[in-house]
Amino acid sequence: MKDKDKTMEDCSKKILAVRDALEIFSGKWKIPIIGSLIHFEEARFKDLQNIIGDITPRMLSKELKELETNLLITREVI
């Protein structure tokens, strides 16, 4: 029984990491934003908006702030 409990604890810890990652990348726009930044490396706000297409400035700003909060991107003011 102890081995089973240990296995369940290990599994729970691993599931938490996956859940956290899914939470960070959740939403319609985060993956397209990250993909655009990987491809272009650097992009201005308006450039990102044009590349992605249907995203509103408000939503782009919100998603970029969340990605910056999670340390996935850095923002540079020019």
Image: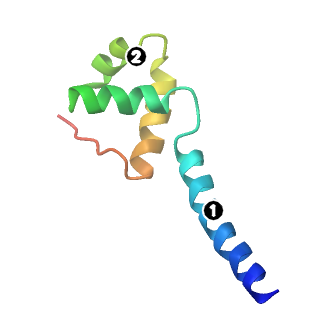
Crowding near the residue tagged with mark 2, few <14, some 14–19, many ≥20 C-alpha atoms within 10 Å: some
Indicate the quadrant where residue 4 lies. Answer: bottom right
Spot occupied by residue 24 in the image (x, y as percentages of width and height): 53, 46
The spot of residue 1 in percent (x, y) is: 82, 86
In this orientation, which residue lies closer to the viewer: 6 or 39? 6
Using the image, tell me which numbered label, if any, was put on residue 43.
none
Task: Give left or right: position of 3 versus 46.
Answer: right
Mark 1 secondary-structure assignment: helix
User: Does label 2 or label 1 sit earlier along the sequence?
Assistant: 1
In the rendered image, the residue lying farthest to the bottom is 2
Relative horizontal placement of residue 17, taking residue 33 as reference (left or right): right
Near-viewer residue (18 or 70): 18
Please identify the residue farthest to the right as the structure is shown.
1
Query: What is the spatial separation of the Cα atoms under label 2 and label 1, in whole angstroms?
Result: 31 Å
What is the three-letter code of the residue carrying label 1? Leu
Decide: is 43 above or below 71.
above
Task: Identify the element where label 2 is drawn.
Answer: helix
Q: Which of marks 2 and 1 is in front?
A: 1
- Where does residue 26 sit, x and y in percent of width and height? 58, 38
Position above or below: 67 against 14 = above
Please report the residue visible at 44 percent of the width from the left and 41 percent of the height from the top: 65
Is 23 above or below relative to 43? Answer: below
Q: Mark 2 points at which residue?
A: 52
Q: Quadrant of residue 52?
A: top left
Residue at left offset 37%, top offset 33%: 34
In this rendering, position of residue 30 left or right of residue 28: left
Q: Residue 16 carries which label?
A: 1
- Asked whether disc 2 touches disc 1, contact meaning CB atoms under 8 Å apart, the reply is no
